[in-house]
Amino acid sequence: MKSVPITYFRYRPAAWLRMTGADAETFLQGQFTNDLRNKTPLTGVYGLFLNQKGKTIADGFVMTGSGSDEFLIGSYFCPAANLLKRLGDFIVADEVEIEDLTSGVAGISLMGDGAGEWLGSSPREGSVFHGRRSGGESWEWVLPENRAGAAAALLAGAREFDALGMEQVRIAAGIAAVPQDIGPGDLPNEGGLESVAISYDKGCYLGQEIMARLKTRGRLRRSLMRVKGNGPAPVPPAPLWQAGRLAGQLRSAVPGPGGFLGLALMNLDGLGGADPSHFLKREAPRSS
């Protein structure tokens, strides 16, 4: 391991669900923004679950399970209860069952050149799939919680991130966390998720009409951007101001060099080419 530049992070997924039933694939295809026809047992598919207005309710990785009618759905940040409600609200006559496995699993994120090669060098218990932790090579390994310690021991010699370090990597890469950075009041395109999470060719799914309209003639009024500021990081969500006007909202923040780094949903009207870091203030300026 010492010769391979891998870093890793141990965590508990916020959600890990198992969906089974004769209608499982058809049902998921009609709810998920990405195309499950592109899935493989190894890589899975990343996508979103929207509402009728195209707003972002949850995200997740979907992959095949051990059976032909079995699928696993995992999420870094979306609580299992949110995913269960979003899916359950649209099960009518579908032959589908959903089981919450979250409490019994643990995850290991592996990043860096060679992470996938190392994971593929031996059979791995659990699920292995492409992740979204950093701007480079990123993989996930989710396995039974009681096997996580032994799995982490195999990574002796690699650098381990703590939760803060992992957040710093994510924010530096500009990767939106759902629902913290992009949530129920936001369109996925505002977080730059259309290129990784949305299929425009798969056909109907909940929110698909809004996504198609945005692609053909839509104009976004807000965009998730990296920001920086001096002093301690404000507790998100925090307003950002410019010349006495609300310019956006800080959604994530971590300590950085000389201050803090963050991701903020910025109002594009009036932003121009200005640096978003100039907008960061704790409160609106007082009128004189």
Image (cartoon, helix red, strand yellow):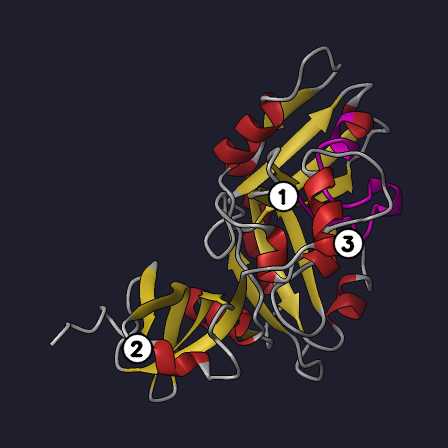
| Residue 270 is inside the magenta segment | no
**CA separation, marks 2 and 1?**
42 Å
Residue 178 seen in this snapshot: yes
Marks 3/1: CA–CA distance: 31 Å
Q: Position of residue 44 (x, y in %)?
A: 78, 48
Is 208 above or below relative to 262? above
Disc 3 designates what residue?
216
Q: Which mark is residue 243?
A: 2
**How far apart are the alpha carbons under marks 3 and 2?**
34 Å
Labels 3 and 2 touching (C-beta < 8 A): no
In the rendered image, which residue does mark 1 sit on? Answer: 74
| Residue 34 magenta-highlighted | yes
Three-letter amino acid code of the residue under disc 2: Ala
Residue interval drawn in magenta? 27-48
How many C-alpha atoms fall within 10 Å of the one at disc 2: few (<14), some, or many (≥20)? few
Per the rendering, the mark at residue 31 is none
Relative height, residue 210 to residue 233 (above, below): above
